[in-house]
Amino acid sequence: MRRRSLAAVLLSASGALAAPLVHTADVKCPIVFDGRVPTGTAPTFFDTYATNTIFNPDYVKGNDLKWSQILQFPSGDASRFDGTNFTALEVTLSDKSIFQKQNGFRRAGLQFLKDAADGPGMKGVKTLHFSVKQDSARKLNLTHEYLSSNQIQFQTGQIIGKSASDKNNFKVLDRNVNSLYSVAQDAAKWQNFAITLNYDKNQVQIYYSTGTDALKSVAGPTSTNLAGGGQFQIGILKKPTGSSDVVNSGYQESNLNEGQIYGGMFLEDSANNCVSL
């Protein structure tokens, strides 16, 4: 899951009198890129290179937007690898979420600041961790396709030209749109994913859990083509409907207000079969 955002792509608040649930799982492997956001971080932190030490402040977002206009800090239970030290982050879409001249897409993708197309993220064996949660006030419109793709694709919604029978699922696909793993969206719980990319053997292994449960292997290792460069992104890329030229044209709703909540975002070195579970 590489360049173009890891998307989906990618929150049910606790009751007013209930304290958020906190459970911290340890990261057991060396961190290559850490996308976890320290608790108490101000939204304006993400706007410039002078302050943003986590993500690239320039990419990938609407041309006239700052990250402080895109990102929200939702309340609620902490994700598995966040605990009390790190906070969940919500990536949102609006009518202004047009990157460069890609008028068909609505997109916002966080890119690790020190990531590079030929950097350490695409060498050896690496595992990308992220948790997702749904925001009942900013629901995704699953008649659209939400997708980020390159070597591996993370997708939800109705894939263009395909059946809508699994539109409510998160799907991990290879670059040829072959299914590697699929699981239904959960309206309330955190859904935790870890995807091990073995560039040496061209293999993918997927781990998954919900809530604060430990990750378990659910697919693989599966042989697939991981060749080519790229950069990791975490966020949303929403395709239009009604067009074969999805980059440049198609239907998108007006007054768009959608979001995806993320937590526990990091890339770790999985040499010697090391995976934080």
Image (cartoon, rainbow, N blue to C red):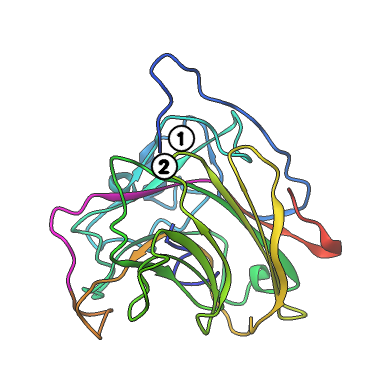
Q: Nearer the viewer, residue 268 or 19?
A: 19
Q: Nearer the viewer, residue 101 or 144?
A: 144
Please give left or right for residue 254 compared with residue 183 in the image. left
Q: Residue at x 44, y 53 (%)?
A: 49
* Magenta span: 251-264
From the image, tell me which residue sits under label 1: 41
Please give left or right for residue 7 compared with residue 65 in the image. right
The image quarter in which residue 167 lies: bottom left
Q: Residue furthest front?
A: 165
In magenta stretch: residue 252: yes
Q: Residue at x 40, y 38 (%)?
A: 11
| Image x and y of residue 210, in percent | 59, 44
Q: Nearer the viewer, residue 137 or 91?
A: 137
Mark 1 vs 2: CB contact within 8 A: yes
Q: Residue furthest right?
A: 272
Amino acid residing under circle 2: Phe
Q: Which mark is residue 45?
A: 2
Is residue 236 depicted above or below 200 in this figure? Answer: above
Q: Is residue 235 visible?
A: yes
